[in-house]
Image (cartoon, rainbow, N blue to C red):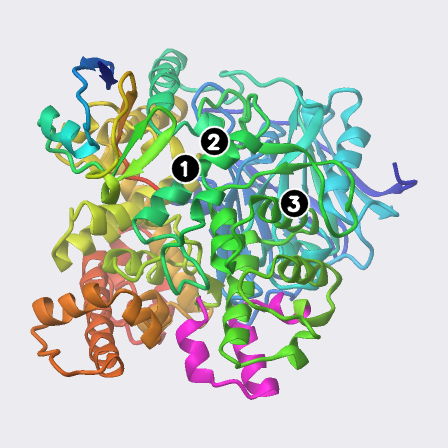
Amino acid sequence: MSDYQLKEVKALSYQRPDMVNGYNDQSLYINLSDQEIAIKPVAEKTKKTFIGGKGYNLWLLWNAVQPSTKWNDPENALCIAAGPLGGTPIYPGSGKSIVATLSPTTASVIDSNVGGYFGPYLKFSGFDALEIQGKSAKEVVVFIDGVNQKIQIYETRDLPQNAYALSAVLTEHFAGGKPRNISVVSAGPGAKNTLIGCLNFTWYDPKRKRARYKQAGRGGVGTVFADKGLKAIVACWDHVTAETNNPADKARLKNVAKLHSREIVELDPKQNEMSKIGTTHLVTIMNDHDLLPTHNFRYGQHSQAPNLGQEVYRRLFDPGFDGCWMGCTVACSHGIKDFVPLTGPYKGKKVFVDGPEYETVAGCGSNLGIFDPHTVAEINFYCDAYGLDTISVGTGIAFGMECFEMGLINETHTGGLSLHFGNRLGALELVHQMANGEGFGRIVGQGVRRMKAIFAKDFGADPEVMQDIGMEAKGLEFSEYMTKESLAQQGGYGLALKGPQHDEAWLIFLDMVHNFMPTFDQKAEALHWFPMFRTWFGLCGLCKLPWNDIVPEDNKDTAEPAKVMKHVQWYADYFSAITGNEVGPEDLINMSETVYNFQRIFNLRMGFGRRQHDDIPYRAMGPVTEDEYESRAERYDKQLAETYKVDIEGKSSAEKLAILRKHREAQYEKLKDAVYKRRGWTPDGVPTQKTAKRLGIDFTEVIELLKANGVNS
Amino acid sequence: MIQVAGKQIAWREGMTVSDLLDELKDPHPYAVVRINEQYVTRPNFEHILIPDGAEVFLIPMIAGG
């Protein structure tokens, strides 16, 4: 154990309010520049309009920043919130925290959701949201002690740098013998030295007697955290029951929670076995459908993919209960016990790896041409410990590897690393370099958008080629699904507010495998309904997995199986039972639509949020290279001949590639038109004044902004 | 015999996943089934054989992210 110091420099005692129907109606504000600690009321109108969670974060952030604010300006706010349903221990998946801030990589609003105990403990301590502004010159730990009703800021010395050790030290330090009462949020050296830092949110695992963690990964939220001089934020709360949220109708809550919880216990073993293998079942399923990204999203399939599949992780995962929130029956947060890294500061020592999940396996495995589960586990371990987002790390290194293989960059630029696909030690070396802010890893740690600019300016690489193969949009790296053959999922990524993350819409199977949405109007309807419903989970502090990863046995016989309407109704009942506001499924969509449109308008305010910002690289739409075309020539030839009525006789692969590209790019633009129309936006992708008024977000500032951008009705 | 979604179904030599789905007359477009602990996806339904005594789960695969 390190010999560290924590010196209190500011404290505020407070009176915790009585929770009423899932709300405290106040937020906690901390300014690290002058160590101000303040408790602020939440206005009734804010509550009605923004609901909670991500909605509250966006409103706090909107009021904190200006259009000119940059991610590393002191006024940028880092906001964390649960939501009115968050912290309910009897309803599966009710422990999510949502983080929002201005992103270092996108320069606009980013939101990222995460498990662990912090969000519920923050709320039970008396705060529906936490807003942190300012910057501290010295590293600080913020302690939110809901038990003793005290907020403290500590200056720190000699605490461990990495989140793996730091989480353990701070859990023990603040626990007072009750480690389950503590949740630690921290980043790590990688977050400080890159722009793709993640945040680790802990939960204490009593069986394994260790602090474990989940990650808010996307968009550099950990980098903002580290830049503010935050070492950690720690929350403490004691006893959690179904009544801690003080629900409006306890009997109704218990009834609906029991229905959903029992269904998962009964059906998960018959369906995807997430309580045993997490999301790793997706690896071989995606591979078989040509959807698993390999070699920087060139291809969707590889013969060695089963090496990274659920059969392997079923053996590697340490058996036992792995719920990242109390009482969750999905319990999918698995890990590997007694793992021994081959590299880095933990080389030769036994560690516990939290993960991997599907995204990490695909991003740091198949997409790098690495089909060794131990290397994936080691990259997973170090990314978490260093505070690095495994998705951006994977997609960034994959881009670097393809540039290396194409000769766009060489060993002179990589510091001697032979960065071919499949170079396991090279990938690990880059992760360590990112943590230290040195070597070629320092460049990869800037994210794909900046890598493209640096490669072009400093290394003379062809910018047009890199634009096609650099898998980022809006400045955010793609998460790990192939979209070439699913136009709807191209929209699911490209039209997502924060950038290409699958949490808004995952439509690949519905579109490509089941063919549930053959027309543009059907795709547009799906790209309206699914992002809206999925947004609702982030408003309320919930995980979406119980909604559609375990589904009722009779779901397939319902009118709209993709929506799992039985569960949507349960969620409406759940919301009604906690808050006392009687709602139905349509009301959930309306809540989300309000916040969703507000976020789009927020993007506009920051200089984005228009049609051009919804563009995606061509690699996401179709084959970039002749090799890619020829590897699936039958598929592409058929589409050219049958769908586009092109006479392909005698045409070279290069010619066919160019024709296919023209058609696919046109299809994507047509999709944008259909979706914007469905969402009540202008053809330039901006919500109309009419839409803003309908949703109750026609604040003076919003209307002025829309007018200034030429939207006058 | 094999067990499918909790029901006993007669097994025969050479029975594939496609054969089973035809026999069940279930119109749902399954993308994935699970035979004991082995996941089988639609591209492989026609050539993967179901062993006698297997437990088969029909996976309503609509989610992924």
Give the number of the disc on residue A281: 1
Give the number of the disc on residue A674: none
Give the number of the disc on residue A381: 3
User: Is there one chain holding both mark 3 and mark 2?
Assistant: yes
Question: Residue farthest to the front?
Answer: B13
CA gap between label 3 and label 2 equals 18 Å
For the point 70% across and 75% down, the residue is: A415
A646 drawn magenta? no
Dot 1 amino acid type: His
Q: Earlier in the sequence, mark 1 or mark 3?
A: 1
Q: Nearer the viewer, residue B47 or A670?
A: B47
For the point 88% across and 48% down, the residue is: A157
The image quadrant that residue A544 belongs to is: top left
Residue A246, above or below A491 = above
Dot 2 amino acid type: Ile
For the point 62% across and 39% down, the residue is: A201
- Asked if the residues shown at circle 2 and circle 1 are in contact, with their CB atoms under 8 angstroms apart, the answer is yes
Which residue range is magenta in the image?
A442-471
Density class for disc 2 (Cα within 10 Å; few <14, some 14-19, many ≥20) is: many
Q: Nearer the viewer, residue B20 or A489?
A: B20
Q: How many marks?
A: 3
User: Is there one chain holding both mark 1 and mark 3?
Assistant: yes
- Looking at the rendered image, the quarter that the C terminus of chain A falls into is bottom left
Q: Chain of mark 2?
A: A
Q: Chain of mark 3?
A: A
Q: Earlier in the sequence, mark 3 or mark 2?
A: 2
User: What residue is disc 2 on?
Assistant: A277
Dot 3 amino acid type: Phe
- Asked if the residues shown at circle 1 and circle 3 are in contact, with their CB atoms under 8 angstroms apart, the answer is no
Q: Chain of mark 1?
A: A
Provide residue A431's location: percent of width, then percent of height. 66, 58
- Report the magenta stretch's main SS: helix
